[in-house]
Image (cartoon, helix red, strand yellow):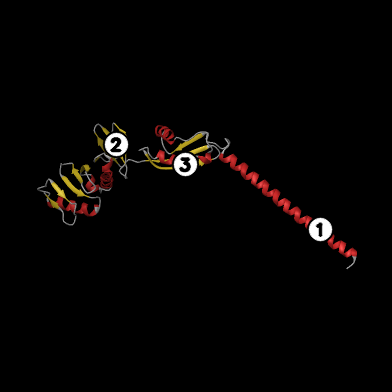
Amino acid sequence: MSTATRSAGAERFAARARRRRFRGAVRVVIALLLAVAAGGLAWLVGWSSVLSVNDVAVHGVGDDLRSDVTDIAEVPIGVPLIRVDTDGVADRVRELPDVGEVSVRRSWPNTLTIDIAAREASAAVRDGRSWWSVDETGVLFGRADTPPDGVPVLVTPTDESARLARVTGVAVVTSLPSSIDQLVESVEAESPAGVRLILTDGTTVVWGTADRAQDKTRALLALMEAHDEDPPSVYDVSAPDTPAVS
């Protein structure tokens, strides 16, 4: 191999080596730039005031409840939005009796949004001189001097241990067919298996649990027809296959 050939080969080898070193240096620079950018972004999101909370938006409720939600949420104003414990905020808001479903989300750049579905009254429960609304889960809320409009009255204990009784009572009072509902003055639920209907004429219907409502309705109507001329004081349809009177 001639000297000129060896020299050209060495030059090509040196050029390839320079290109490899250049590409390596470029990769190092890019990696450094990416690391700096990631660090800057992390600082911007997690520690700077640029993306911190400066507003709390509450959706789905009226002004009175909105104020209560804002107070109990205890959202830390000025803290970076990404560092707010949204689960903790939601748990605190759920402590309000009037609040049903709660979701908390970050609305960039500076707002924490609390979306709420307020509880809906399924029945009214009297407690001394006051009235509670009760929903289908047996939760009492919205204490007021008058019962809520458009819901049936449920006579049931108001202590927390009676929640299952309220659930059963609500299930019964909201599922009565019109043929029975128009005859009912009130519904009493002392226990999950102790629901009674008080008819407008003072007659008591032992209803039992919320199960087999259609069968109980048919049994009650049959008993009422059979004793039309001599109505009893109590109809018992808690076991609809073997109804009784007394």
Mark 3 or mark 2: which comes first in sequence?
A: 3
Residue 155, image x, y percentages? 23, 40
- The secondary element bearing badge 1 is classed as helix
Q: Label 1: few (<14), some or many (≥20) within 10 Å?
A: few
Decide if residue 235 is in sight here.
yes
222 and 189: which is toward the camera: 189
The reply to whether dot 1 and dot 2 touch (C-beta < 8 Å) is: no
106 and 161: which is toward the camera: 161
- For the N terminus, the image quarter is bottom right
Nearer the observer, disc 3 or disc 2?
A: 3
- In three-dimensional space, the C-alpha distance between marks 1 and 2, rounded to whole angstroms, equals 89 Å
Give amino acid for label 2: Trp
Give amino acid for label 3: Thr
Horizontal side of 112 relative to 139 (left or right) equals right
Extreme residue toward the right, this view: 3
Q: Which residue is mark 1?
A: 14
Which residue is drawn at the image coordinates 84% and 61% (left, top)?
10
Which residue is drawn at the image coordinates 81% and 60% (left, top)?
13
Seen in the picture, residue 113 relative to 15 is either above or below; the reply is above
- The secondary element bearing badge 2 is classed as strand
Q: Label 3: few (<14), some or many (≥20) within 10 Å?
A: many
Q: Which mark is residue 174?
A: none
Horizontal side of 26 relative to 6 (left or right) equals left
Residue 157, image x, y percentages? 24, 40
Q: Which residue is mark 3?
A: 86
Decide if residue 115 is in sight here.
no
Q: Which mark is residue 132?
A: 2
Mark 1 or mark 2: which comes first in sequence?
A: 1
- In three-dimensional space, the C-alpha distance between marks 3 and 2, rounded to whole angstroms, equals 30 Å
Which residue is drawn at the image coordinates 73% and 51% (left, top)?
25
Horizontal side of 8 relative to 27 (left or right) equals right
